[in-house]
Image (cartoon, rainbow, N blue to C red):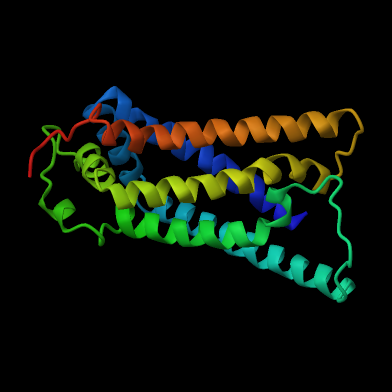
Amino acid sequence: MIVAVTGVILIVFVVGHLLGNLQIFLGPDWINGYAQHLRDLGPLLWLIRLFLLAAVVIHIYVTIQLAIENRRARPEPYVDREYVKATFASRHMVISGLIVLAFIIYHLAHFTVRVTDPRFALLKADPLGHYDVYSMMVYGFQNYYVSAFYIVGLFLLTLHLSHGSSSFFQSLGFNDKKLTPRLAVGGRIFAWLLFIGYTAIPVAILLGFIRPAQQL
């Protein structure tokens, strides 16, 4: 239940984060204004960040504990293992989760702390006095290696969510023979829609559809 609840919290954040990031397609004023609005929250923003960080840590810790308990319950592996309902995503939730954690840490260092690209410090504020998040994202994703890493990280996140976004219903006690298969399909569709939304940004930048507002 703890894994399910913390998972729901993180899913809500992932959706909200995507909606904010997609504003890059609307132009610099939109995404820069959105970023400034978040910074204007001041201490509240840091409380939200700490809350999300706690949710991530608890989610991973309890998931690992469950995996250890499952392993202890059957120390001897099956001689002949055939999976009936378990998908690749559901069987590798711990591994994909840990890799996604590494992806999140790099993402924070890249765009939040801004310590991975020296060009970010050269960006000037836009005419409204807002930090040029628009150009920062463009310059960040113009690096093929960075974009490739993001897409791989998002793919693993998609695998994680394709199982987690529907399994939390079962964890919370919503079991139904007709509803469960539909939730499983809906969870996969939901996860891949997120993948398309997130990867659309670096792909559009690499293809030249989105260019920086200021030249360095």
Q: Quadrant of the C terminus?
A: top left
Q: Which residue sits at x=89%, y=62%? A: 80
Q: With 213 as the anchor, is 45 left or right in this view?
A: right
- The residue lying furthest to the right in this view is 177
In the image, residue 42 above or below residue 187: below
Q: Nearer the viewer, residue 100 or 75?
A: 75
Residue drawn at the location 26% of the way across and 57% of the way down: 114
Position of 158 with respect to 50 (left or right) is right
Would residue 104 appear left or right of 6 to someone viewing this image?
Answer: left
Between 6 and 209, the one nearer to me in the picture:
209
The image shows residue 71 at horizontal and vertical percentages of 81, 71
Q: Residue at x 8, y 39 (%)?
A: 215
Quadrant for residue 69, please give it: bottom right
Q: Is residue 34 above or below residue 209?
A: below
- In the displayed structure, would residue 15 be above or below residue 98? above
Q: Percent position (x, y) of residue 173? A: 86, 44
* Residue lying at 67% horizontally and 56% vertically, measured from the top left: 93
Q: Nearer the viewer, residue 143 or 28?
A: 143
Residue farthest along the top direction in this orientation: 26
* Image position, residue 51 (x, y; %): 53, 56
Q: In x, y percent, where is residue 185?
A: 73, 31
